Image (cartoon, rainbow, N blue to C red):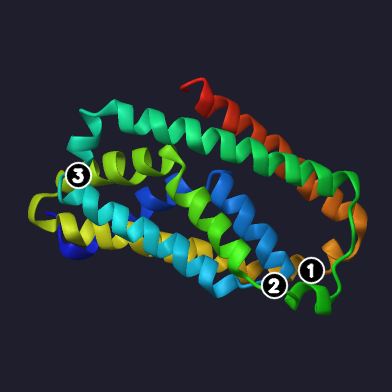
């Protein structure tokens, strides 16, 4: 017999299984976490965005999106081009890596990081597929407990992005070397390029 708590647990597991995979959001939050730059706003953006999209999926918006594939295709093109552009910046950083000292980590405005995070979240059609369509459909399968399932899925985003953003500082010793940043930015450049190309090709 299903209870609200079993539904929450199921939602938590389903949500975590989808967001743990390496993606644009995760790579960006990890890098900014290592820089200790505006981590809290980025965590809030990612977790709140997932919660909103999951709620919309439970409300049935995912059905509308499913019968209007043109919307996802538009997001795929915009998101693909954005990811490839971001990959170019990561590749340039990898070519000329630098060690970030504490003053540099905290310097400057965080508006660019916030805008980039918003773009990586809302211009990525995979986010809509995972939250609106998949998690929304799974939640509605729980009937009257669908909001408990959705709460569990949203909680998984909070836990994951909080751990990723604030836990990144544990690796700060390793990233005290320029070569470590070169490896990270190379991985990010390859991952972003791969994601961007896949989106442009409609995969």
Q: What residue is drawn where x is 29% and y is 27%?
A: 69
The residue that label 1 is drawn on is 172
Residue 116 found in image quarter? bottom right
Residue 106 appears left or right of 135? right
Q: Residue furthest top?
A: 201
Could you tell me if the residues under marks 3 and 2 are in contact, i.e. CB atoms within 8 Å?
Answer: no
Q: Describe the element under mark 1 as helix, strand or loop.
A: loop
Q: What's the CA distance linking mark 3 and mark 2?
A: 36 Å
The residue that label 3 is drawn on is 61
Specify which label sits upstream in the sequence, 2 or 1: 2
Residue 108 found in image quarter? bottom right
Residue 88 appears left or right of 28? right
Q: Position of residue 29 (x, y in %)?
A: 60, 59
Residue 185 appears left or right of 168? right
Specify which label sits upstream in the sequence, 1 or 3: 3
Residue 3 found in image quarter? bottom left
Q: Nearer the viewer, mark 2 or mark 1?
A: 2
Specify which label sits upstream in the sequence, 3 or 2: 2
Badge 3: residue crowd in 10 Å (few <14, some 14–19, many ≥20): some
Which quadrant of the figure contains the N terminus? bottom left
Q: What residue is drawn where x is 58% and y is 34%?
A: 81
The residue that label 2 is drawn on is 36
* 15 relative to 134, above or below: below
Residue sitting nearer the eye, 186 or 110? 110
Residue 164 appears in view: no
Q: Describe the element under mark 2 as helix, strand or loop.
A: loop
Q: Position of residue 138 (x, y in %)?
A: 23, 43
Badge 1: residue crowd in 10 Å (few <14, some 14–19, many ≥20): some
Q: What's the CA distance linking mark 2 and mark 1?
A: 9 Å
Could you tell me if the residues under marks 2 and 1 are in contact, i.e. CB atoms within 8 Å?
Answer: yes
């Amino acid at each position: 017999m299903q209870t609200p708590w079993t539904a929450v647990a199921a939602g938590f597991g389903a949500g975590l299984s989808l967001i743990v995979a390496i993606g644009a959001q995760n790579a960006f939050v990890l890098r900014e976490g290592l820089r200790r730059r505006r981590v809290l706003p980025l965590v809030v953006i990612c977790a709140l965005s997932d919660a909103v999209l999951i709620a919309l999926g439970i409300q049935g918006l995912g059905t509308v999106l499913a019968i209007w594939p043109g919307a996802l295709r538009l997001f795929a093109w915009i998101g693909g081009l954005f990811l490839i552009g971001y990959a170019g910046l990561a590749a340039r950083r990898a070519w000329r890596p630098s060690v970030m000292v504490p003053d540099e980590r905290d310097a400057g405005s965080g508006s660019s990081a916030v805008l980039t995070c918003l773009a990586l979240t809302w211009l990525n059609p995979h986010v809509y597929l995972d939250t609106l369509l998949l998690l929304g459909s799974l939640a509605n399968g729980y009937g009257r407990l669908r909001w408990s399932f959705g709460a569990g899925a949203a909680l998984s985003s909070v836990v994951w992005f909080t751990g990723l953003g604030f836990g990144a500082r544990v690796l700060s010793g390793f990233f005290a070397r320029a070569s470590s940043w070169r490896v990270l930015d190379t991985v990010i450049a390859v991952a972003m390029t791969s994601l961007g190309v896949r989106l442009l090709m409609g995969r």
